[in-house]
Every structure is written in C-alpha cells, then in structure tokens.
Amino acid sequence: MHIYDETIVKAIEVAHSKGVPLDLTLQSGEDLESWAKKLDAKLLPTRSLRLERSVQLTDLTGYSDGKWWVQDAAAALPARLLAPQKGEAILDLCAAPGGKTMQLASAGADVTALDLSKDRMTRLQDNLARVGLAADCVTADALNWTPKKPFDAILLDAPCSATGTIRRHPDLPFVKTGKGLDELFQLQSDLIDRAVAMLRPGGRFVYCTCSLLTEEGERQAKLAMERHSLTELEPNPQDLGIDPGWLANSGGIRLRPDYWGECGGMDGFYMIMLKKPQ
C-alpha cells in the first residue's frame, strides 16, 4: 500500500478541512472567458469554471439553457484526456451521473453510456435532457454486456474506494473501512479487461478512479499494460492545463486534493490513456 510522506499528508488534511468550491463544465464551443464574467467565476487552466461562493444552481445564468453542468475540475479531466472527436464511437463505462457522458456528447462523439444502476441511469438521462445532449443509454452489467461492434475509444471511471473525495464527504473515513478493498481491486481489473475486449485494435482507453490509493490507479494501469500489451499515450500538460509535476512517475496523471489548495483544491484522481495494439 502506497504511503504518502508526512508533508503531503498534512497538505491533504488542510485541503480536506476547507470548504469545497463549485466547479462547472461548459458545453463545447462556449466562450469560456465570457461565461466566467457572466457567472463571476474563476477560469481554471483546465477550462473548468470555479465559483467560490454559495449559490442557488437553478438561479445561475445558463442553467435553464443547459449551457453547463456541475463537475469537479479533477473529474472533468479524464474526458479531456481522451480528447473525443466528432463522430467517434465512444463508450462511457460506469457512466452515471453523466458528467463525462455530457462532455463526450458535447464534443460531437457518438456516445454509449452504460451503467449497472437503473436509478443512476435515470438521473443520467435527466441530466442529458437538461443540457440538450443525446447518448445511447444502456442499463446493464459491463462484465456481461456485449456491444454490436467495437468502440473507437472507451472511458472507464471505475468503482473505487472514493478516497479522493473525502473533502466532499468528510464522513467517508468513518463509514468505510479497508474491508472489501480486495474485491474492488478485482472488479477494477475485470472491468479493464472487458473494456479492452470492447475496444477496436488501435483504439484508445482512459482508465480513471477518484482514489488516492496507487493500488486503484498506477498499479492497475501497470498490470493492465502487461496483460494486454497496452502502451501509454502520454499526455501533454500544456494542452490539458495541468502542472507537469502532476504526471505520475510510472505513467498517467496523479491529482491530489491539495493541488490548487490556494483556490479550493480538487478531488484526488488517477487517470491514464492507453492504446490497444493493432
């Protein structure tokens, strides 16, 4: 189990103790700077808008028009890392509540959103309807579901310990223990295997988790690369608007709650983009 050094742990604890700002993702094609002014928001380097005050969402400009949706700045990065292209067939695995699905659809991709939970899928469909976007919504077990044809790209935000979201859910350390982690690790591995099987040769695959545990991030990626002869498509920090220091030594991007601590931090996340051999 990876152990962060004392300095990092203290910085994460400070980030957890602070209030959580509200981050918004805009529809593709919207003018970021214009919307930042309209909403009195900070435009982050990753292209999310950040509001550092309490607001009534439904009263905000653009809500009724579906111009944006709520999504933590860190959670918005996996879809941007995937770099969806217009007309691409993309699968969003474990898709609900739909933030990443909306990002992919807004970019013009032909999106299939798959989730196991009927209730969560209903929420995803409601979110799509509000912003005027469309996706093929499938309620099924990803481990058993088979598509009609392989996808050009797949995004898997895998079930995990959610240790990267403690700042939003401060009760998490008290209601969860380490029990069941081995089952989660195995599920993540199984979902990765299914994703690779549903991907066309030469297709790309983003794996991510909102976890601070390397066992759910870097290690899963390393083992997947070994099992399936995957190669990393290395990210360009400048294109994503991230600090080069956020790149993990073993590949991918490692985000922590203390990053951007001076303006509200972010959720802890790991993400990596991999390519299936031809």
Image: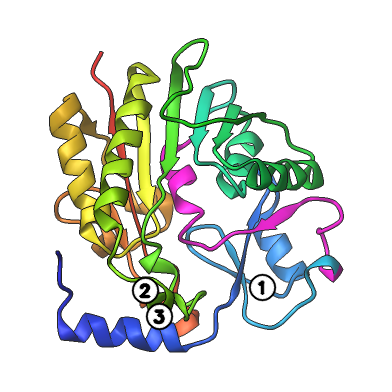
Which residue sits at x=75%, y=70%? Answer: 39
Position of the N terminus by quadrant: bottom left
> Which secondary structure, mark 3?
helix
Rounded to the nearest angstrom, the CA distance separating label 2 from label 3 is: 24 Å
Q: Earlier in the sequence, mark 1 or mark 3?
A: 1
Residue flagged by tag 1: what amino acid is it? Ala
Contact check, label 2 and label 1, Cβ < 8 Å: no
For the residue carrying disc 1, how many other residues have a C-alpha within 10 Å: few (<14), some (14-19), or many (20+)? some
Front in this rendered view, residue 44 or 175:
175
Per the image, the residue denoted by label 3 is 174
Rounded to the nearest angstrom, the CA distance separating label 2 from label 1 is: 19 Å
- Is residue 127 placed above or below 261 in the rendered structure? above
* Magenta residues, dominant SS class: loop
Per the image, the residue denoted by label 2 is 259
Per the image, the residue denoted by label 1 is 41
In the figure, is residue 16 to the left or right of 131? left
Query: Which of label 2 and label 3 is nearer to you?
Result: 3
Q: Earlier in the sequence, mark 2 or mark 1?
A: 1
Which residue sits at x=50%, y=41%? Answer: 94
In the figure, is residue 169 to the left or right of 66? left
Which residues, given as a range, are shown in magenta? 59-83
Residue flagged by tag 3: what amino acid is it? Phe
Determine which quarter of the picture holds residue 254. Answer: bottom left
> Which secondary structure, mark 2?
loop
Position of the C terminus by quadrant: top left
Front in this rendered view, residue 278 or 137:
137
Which residue sits at x=27%, y=35%? Answer: 233
Residue flagged by tag 2: what amino acid is it? Tyr
Determine which quarter of the picture holds residue 11. Answer: bottom left
In the figure, is residue 37 to the left or right of 74? right
Q: Looking at the picture, how far across and down is residue 44, in whole percent?
A: 52, 66
Report if residue 80 lies within the magenta region.
Answer: yes
